[in-house]
Image (spheres, rainbow, N blue to C red):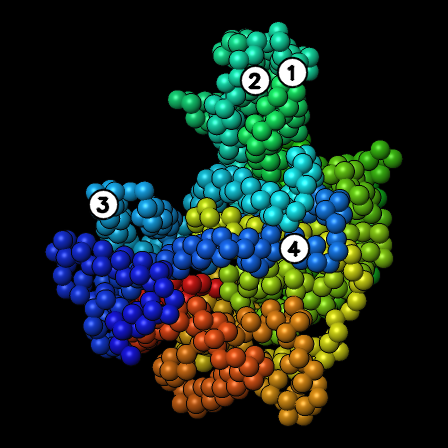
Amino acid sequence: MKAVSVLDDVKQKLGKPYGDLAFLLEALKEVLIENGESEIANQIPWINDIQPNQGKKFTDQQVQLYSIVFHLTNMVEVNGAVQNRRQVEDKDLSAVNGLWASNFEKLKKAKISQEDIIEHLSDICVEPVLTAHPTEAKRHTVLEHHRELYLLLVKRENQMFSKLEQEEIRNEIKLALYRLWKTGEIYREKPDVQSELRNILYYMTNVFPEVLPIMDGRMRQAWKHAGFDAELLNDHKVWPQIKFGNWVGGDRDGHPLVTADVTAYTLEQLRLHAFVVIRRRLMEMIKHLSFALDFEKANWELRKRIQEMIMELGATGEEAFNRNKGEAFRQYVNLCLAKLPVDLRRGHAVAYHELPGSYRMADELLEDLEILQKSLVEFGAKAIAYTEVFEVIRVVGTFGFHLARIDVRQNSEFHEKALAELMEAAGMDPKSYLEADEKGRMKFLNEELKNNRPFATDNAELGPHARAVIDCYHVVADHICKYGHKGIGSFIVSMTRSVSDLLTVFVLAREAGLTRKNADGEVVCEVPVVPLLETIEDLEAGPEILNGFLSHEFTKRTLAYHQKITKANRPLQMVMVGYSDSNKDGGILASQWNVYEAQHKLSTAGNDLGVQVEFFHGKGGSISRGAGPTHYFVDALPHTAVDGHLRLTEQGETIELKYANKMNASFNMELLLASTMSKTIMDRFSKKEAHPLEGLLTRLAKDSKKPYTGLLHSEGFIEYFRTATPIDVIESSKIGSRPSRRTGAKTLNDLRAIPWVFSWAQARYQMTSWYGIGSTLDGLKKKEPKEYDKFKKAIATDPFLRYVLTNVDTSLAAADKEMMNAYAGLCKDEKVRDAFLKKFVNEYEKTKAILADLLEMPVQDRRKAHFYSNQLRASIMNDLNYKQIALLEEWRGYKADGEEEKANDMLESLLLTINAIAGANRNTG
């Protein structure tokens, strides 16, 4: 089918979004023609009759054109999904799975009352943690152009505009397309951490604060729709919470650019932007408080607090109070604004500036807002109190004065070297620790943790690892001393292999003044320490490590200290589980099942010791790295593994995909919060049981790992991987600030999971999310038909199986056998090429066949929108891949001949193809 007729076919089957796409492509064509670029205008796919040319005559301009076309496709599909949900909800608010209304209906059907829901609602807290792993291939400038274009696309749909106004909107769209066309798509230099932080701050200040009231409004509507009492939601303290975390400027695992100064700058910027958000909301609220009320006639509590604030602020307070005379509520908010510790220029917060009487903690502002809300209710302005003021209370409760908690992540080996350098500075023999077994290390650490004296003096000369850790910890200690704990998340230890890996951090924290004596005179740590279990081996060892850590007296005291600070019901220990490395070393089923089993065992280990285990899910943007439909993901977690708390990473291009526009951002936030609420309450009202297919799934996970690891350890695999994928180009790219390898060693173990997945996705194998599934399940079907039937029947009702197999199905649909063959041609060793290509094709065919049998319905029926979208993309995508293959051959030839200058001249063309294919795939790694 010709590409031009494919769009018509998809338009007929899926409707309006693809009509919008045709409109945008026609507008782009006009822009190019008007700009004197008729030749490239006639190369726009899907609206021109273009014959496939296998990329041979493709220019860089055409690659950029196709990249823009795919991003426009992504844009109209997101907008189409928003519009479709609106239409579905117009007929039945509870019809969209995973949102507030459907989850309240689910709880009602389970005979759980509104009183029971309210009792548990305030326990719910989700925390998306924004990261800047090297997965976002688009420049920040390009992202801004995309946002502008999306808003214009939404504006175009408004029926209130006249024909003349619609024409003007069309012209604005053309202008936005022109800017997009003229903007370079790729990073010419690696972005620094500060530029990545600017992108995070955009979402934290301009998207999430706007999304929160939308999501809260939808919860109120869903609550009423369920027939529940709306008055029960008037108290903000009963509402579920959403918080935010941030790794940009804190995550230093294999990232030498994240220094102590960078972390200090990040904390400062987060705090300043929190005040920007809060000030903006207070300024909005004050507009709606124009009630005539003299100060003398206000209620006693409001008057008393006004007088206190004037005294706290002195002349600044008098000035604030003297504005809006006769409007006591506005005078009150003026004083709240004056107490924000920011320096204003032309009405904008530009720097942190604390005065006597300024707020120090967000809780102080919250208390003042509660007084305002109560006073408005007494005044008779109940509607304003429970809308306008409620919204500001929610914003302050969500973002505080810190905007997002920052985590500090570093790997255990780095900590080990830092400790050795500290011992050396103290005149001790570091070998006595480095060469000791776990028992010997524990003995040493136990002795050290009994006292609160440091190894080295402040001006001691330290080795590079110790200096990096201690300087960073000093920044954290300084922040806690000034502003409290709320802006600091935890110290995360990647590659946690033992209890000593965790206790080492407590000893290092002591050097920076991050340990203190509690009320009983015993030493505790100011920052929680969190294990990160990444590989399958680590996940299996995790419960034993956690048991040893939680049983340690220092840990118990530290958890009790933080329980007191946070006013939690019981001690809380976070554990981070990684989906990326476990997938990289075991394949999709082994990874998913081992993460599932680890959570079950870890939560049991915690409960046995009276500790609630909160899981932090290190998920990426691709299925191989844990991505998938949010509500399916939450539902598929083990019983009690959520229990009110859910923390997960949002990485790279996932942030833009989910949160670039407000309505889609609201939808994704609602999915996360509503699903966590439902899962928590359903689990609390049901009996904890092991997975019904636990034995079978444990066996299948092991069986599926064998062909996957067998492939990776086969002779010649590294050669095939490094030639049949563009991994070498990805390693040369300027996408993110982090290196693609942890230490720089050219081994599979050292390669980060992101470029590993990214390279297979570029070559259209997508093998990291399906290899090993087909042969394993085919073997089960042939050897144990009864077990296979049991497995097949369970798919309809089992959330874990549904989630995993739906994701495998999605990845398989994006794989392409023709492209596997084409990229295999880059491997010049015929024997290696033929052997591995045969393995990939055989497993691909087996997996397709077994999924067709298990899921029964044809893919075009069970995943209609996804199927036809893939079909549309595939109709023009091959040209990009063939272009990349041709460029790879030429580039590698220059590299092999030592002609680095010629190779460097080609790199930009190669990176353009990577960017375009990433856009077509809708993710990188």
Q: Are marks 2 and 3 in contact (CB under 8 Å)?
A: no
Find residue 164 and report its horizontal and vertical position in percent: 21, 43
Provide the residue designation for mark 1: 302
In this rendered view, identify the residue nearer to me: 272 or 155: 155
Q: Measured along the vertical axis of the image, is residue 141 above or below residue 811? A: above
Asked if residue 703 is positioned above or below residue 640 in the image, the reply reads below
Q: Is residue 184 visible?
A: yes
Q: Residue furthest left?
A: 36
Image quarter (top left, top right, bottom left or bottom right) of the N terminus:
bottom left
Quickly name the residue at label 2. 329
Q: Position of residue 10 (x, y in %)?
A: 35, 70
Q: Earlier in the sequence, mark 2 or mark 3?
A: 3
Callout in the foreground (4, 2): 4
Marks 1/3 in contact by CB < 8 Å: the verdict is no
Kindly identify which numbered label has been placed on residue 455. none
The residue singled out by tag 3 in the image is 163
Q: Is residue 910 left or right of residue 579?
A: left
Q: Secondary structure at mark 3?
A: helix
Sequence order check, earlier mark of 1 and 2: 1
**Category of crowding for the residue at label 3, using alpha-carbon neighbours closer than 10 angstroms: few (below 14), some (14–19), many (at least 20):** few
Judged from the image, the secondary structure of the residue bearing numbered disc 4 is helix
Q: Amino acid at mark 3?
A: Lys
Mark 4 highlights which residue?
105
Say whether marks 4 and 3 touch (CB < 8 Å). Answer: no
Please give the name of the residue rendered at 27% of the width and 61% of the height, measured from the top-left corner: 22
